[in-house]
């Protein structure tokens, strides 16, 4: 029987220092919950000589990964260093050394999750990753345990705090994209290089993790259809508002007999949809289960302390398992074979904004293209400016396949008198 | 090593039949998740001769509890019979027989939870009760595991589906209380005797369960301040709307150095508050943690399949523990001594609706009463009707103690020219 649990912390940045703070501030609570104290034995950092605000002793810090991994008194590794390859190697080495791992690393889990979980199983170690998705919201645990008995059919969610912050500022304070991004950076929500956020890659990684778990199947990053924030054209947010929608960069995942579909894209949410009012850096995920129906989980999607809360929740779970001697007993193998829907099997409503020469007959021409492709229209609006030679037409379709949508957009772009499809969006809802 | 797990189901009503359906429909998924099949070996019912739609064989059913408890092949008892005393005895007998228990019974858990959890510990059995609160929303698990590392400071939530359904119909469809209740009964949301719902007792029981767990302290039903739906007077919902609020029967629990406070009462939520737009039979709980900040969990608060999802989630967790041989290893003892705040230490904003004789000087008299009790006012509005001799005054206070609020209401009721304080509400928010 262990009389304490020792942790090796890899990384002491925003999340790592938060984890250290919770473990120290809540030491009594943890001792009560687990029956033994939890201690940070070693902390791996890049630069030993940096000034750090911490009550941990200087000897705790090291810049040598192997000093942590080879310390046999360390039971559990907490990987919060970020990045992909170094972190992946560190996790692998930890598992091979028989140490359980808690990680907040969505990049690693999205790309190498299945292999790492298998390695964990082989080495009879726990590998927990709650903090990789949804910051402080316990989503992974909800999918693994709370809804374990249900069949998840679909997820829709705002899983990237940075882009949601930017879109909120653009909508509510009429900020430009650049100003909103600058504010997100200043507040620490956006990385120095924000491209993974704004291009939708960060959200796509999180959707890979959520979809794999929800559908018990392998999902690859390449399976995710990704469109980033740059697809949002000037005037689109205002147009959305005119029609009663709010634009969110959202992830979605669905499953039926035809297979799975996973996407990250800017989506028009009806203002009455609860995700439309999830603002700033907050995240929220809607989960639709066969039996449970619809549930939603909302909370801070990023930030030092919320993310550290998730990491520490995992640490407690891993410690419990260590103390009970049942670490590494989760079955991670997917139940279903990977099967991805084709574009002909993905159905949604679409919003098309089309710039045309404002000439007689153009509307008839365009509606005939929709009919030809079997798409029925819910809304048709022409925005003309008397002084201009051009007009914008807005079409909102009923449910069509993504293939129909793509075919229509292609044909529209090749039609004389059509200057171009300025923008297009999936519209949330089933009508 | 067990090669199957056998379940004894106590009760085959709305929830019990849902549990049976999930266990049968998802048998393959469960087998994959657990590695062994899960079977319903016995079902306890009151009336053996009732016609039931089920694929379970007739011999599975019994009307004798001891036939279930004495079946040594049964590992786990699922108590979904409802009621208090019989259910409590059944749970106790199961635990004494060394069988783990999953229950959906909020009445039993709110009143006898601490004793039963202790008995479970003594008998090295699991006792899980996710379905006792929030229907399909995994709230207990979130508090026990997901937010295990955080210190919960406050909860606010809609935890009774029936009253929320009634209030939604009254607000959005201008239904009378009686008609809305009749519809709730027809849809199966309300019990034949709806008093536990409308009087707030059902919600109070759920708040006892949530508060005990969140604050790791004993909370008794008598500690909860309860006001039911009957406190809502005619015209109050419309008045709330005029001032930008929505009335919800809400539970709240807070903790600070002075102790805990738990209440169930009709509350004015600003329309911008996410709980204001939780409609119909849905439940939602806001949780505020030191580290995580604010999170919200939303889902169906009642209904056969959602509640059965929670029960089955617990069954899976209990089965895992049984298979790993670590059942009954949760520490349930509360960490902190029970300490309940006095009314002088409970702070909130209040809405007062006061009927007065419409005479000169009455407003000055009333505002002087607030000043005398140290209450500052955020809003003062006089609603007069030229033809009537009476007028309604509306006062919304800044934060005051409940004691101040009670003293003011008492003094108002004794003031000449005041016909009476028609209604009063806590107002959510801290300004």
Image: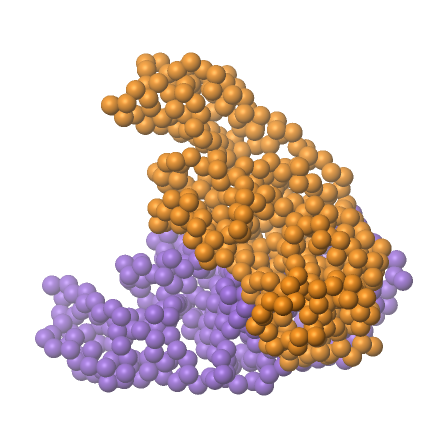
Chain colours: A purple, B orange
Q: Quadrant of residue B145?
A: bottom right
Q: Is residue A368 above or below residue B415?
A: below
Q: Residue furthest right?
A: A1
Residue B391 picture location, percent across and down: 33, 23
* Residue A425 visible, this orientation: no
Q: Is residue A116 above or below residue B405?
A: below
Q: Residue furthest front?
A: B49
Which quadrant holds the N terminus of chain B? bottom right
Residue placed at 15% from the left, 78% from the top?
A364
Residue placed at 50% from the left, 55% from the top?
B189
Q: Is residue A156 above or below residue B380?
A: below
Between A422 and B378, the one nearer to me in the picture: B378
Compared across the picture, whether A17 is left or right of B25 comes to right
Residue placed at 70% from the left, 75% from the top?
B59
Residue A152 picture location, percent across and down: 54, 72
Residue A69 picture location, percent across and down: 80, 70
Between A47 and A431, the one nearer to me in the picture: A431
Q: Residue furthest left?
A: A360
Residue B352 picture location, percent across and down: 44, 29
Compared across the picture, whether B147 is left or right of A366 comes to right
* Residue A258 visible, this orientation: yes
Residue placed at 83% from the left, 62% from the top?
B98
Between B119 and B255, the one nearer to me in the picture: B119
């Amino acid at each position: 029987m262990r009389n304490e649990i020792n942790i090796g912390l890899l990384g002491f940045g925003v999340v790592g220092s938060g984890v250290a703070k919770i473990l120290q501030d809540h030491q009594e609570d943890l001792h009560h919950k687990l029956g033994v104290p939890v201690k940070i034995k070693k902390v791996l950092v890049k630069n030993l000589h940096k000034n750090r605000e911490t009550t941990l002793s200087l000897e705790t810090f090291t810049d040598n990964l192997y000093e942590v991994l080879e310390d046999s008194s360390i039971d559990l590794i907490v990987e919060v260093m970020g990045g992909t390859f170094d972190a992946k190697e560190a996790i692998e080495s930890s598992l091979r050394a028989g140490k359980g791992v808690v990680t907040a690393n969505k990049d690693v889990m999205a790309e190498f999750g299945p292999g790492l979980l298998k390695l964990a199983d082989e080495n009879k170690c726990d590998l927990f990753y709650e903090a990789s998705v949804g910051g402080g919201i316990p989503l992974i645990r909800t999918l693994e345990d709370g809804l374990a008995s249900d069949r998840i059919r679909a997820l829709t969610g705002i899983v990237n705090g940075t882009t949601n912050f930017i879109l909120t500022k653009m909508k509510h304070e009429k900020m430009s994209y650049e100003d909103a991004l600058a504010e997100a950076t200043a507040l620490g929500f956006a990385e120095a290089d924000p491209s993974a956020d704004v291009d939708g890659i960060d959200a796509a990684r999180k959707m890979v993790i959520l979809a794999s778990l929800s559908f018990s199947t392998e999902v690859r990053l390449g399976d995710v259809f990704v469109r980033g924030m740059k697809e949002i054209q000037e005037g689109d947010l205002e147009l959305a508002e005119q029609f009663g929608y709010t634009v969110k960069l959202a992830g979605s995942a669905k499953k039926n007999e035809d297979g799975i579909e996973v996407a990250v894209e800017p989506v028009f949410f009806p203002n009455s949809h609860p995700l439309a009012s999830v603002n700033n850096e907050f995240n929220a995920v809607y989960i639709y289960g066969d039996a449970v129906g619809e549930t939603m989980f909302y909370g801070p999607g990023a930030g030092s302390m919320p993310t550290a809360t998730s990491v520490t929740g995992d640490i407690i779970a891993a410690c419990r398992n260590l103390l009970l001697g049942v670490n590494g007993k989760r079955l991670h193998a997917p139940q279903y074979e990977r099967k991805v829907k084709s574009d002909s099997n993905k159905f949604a409503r679409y919003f098309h904004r089309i710039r045309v020469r404002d000439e007689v007959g153009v509307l008839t021409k365009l509606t005939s293209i929709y009919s030809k492709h079997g798409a029925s229209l819910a809304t048709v609006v022409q925005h003309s400016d008397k002084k201009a030679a051009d007009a914008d037409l807005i079409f909102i379709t009923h449910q069509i396949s993504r293939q129909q949508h793509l075919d229509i957009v292609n044909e529209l772009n090749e039609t004389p008198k059509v200057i171009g499809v300025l923008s297009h969006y999936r519209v949330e809802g089933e009508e």
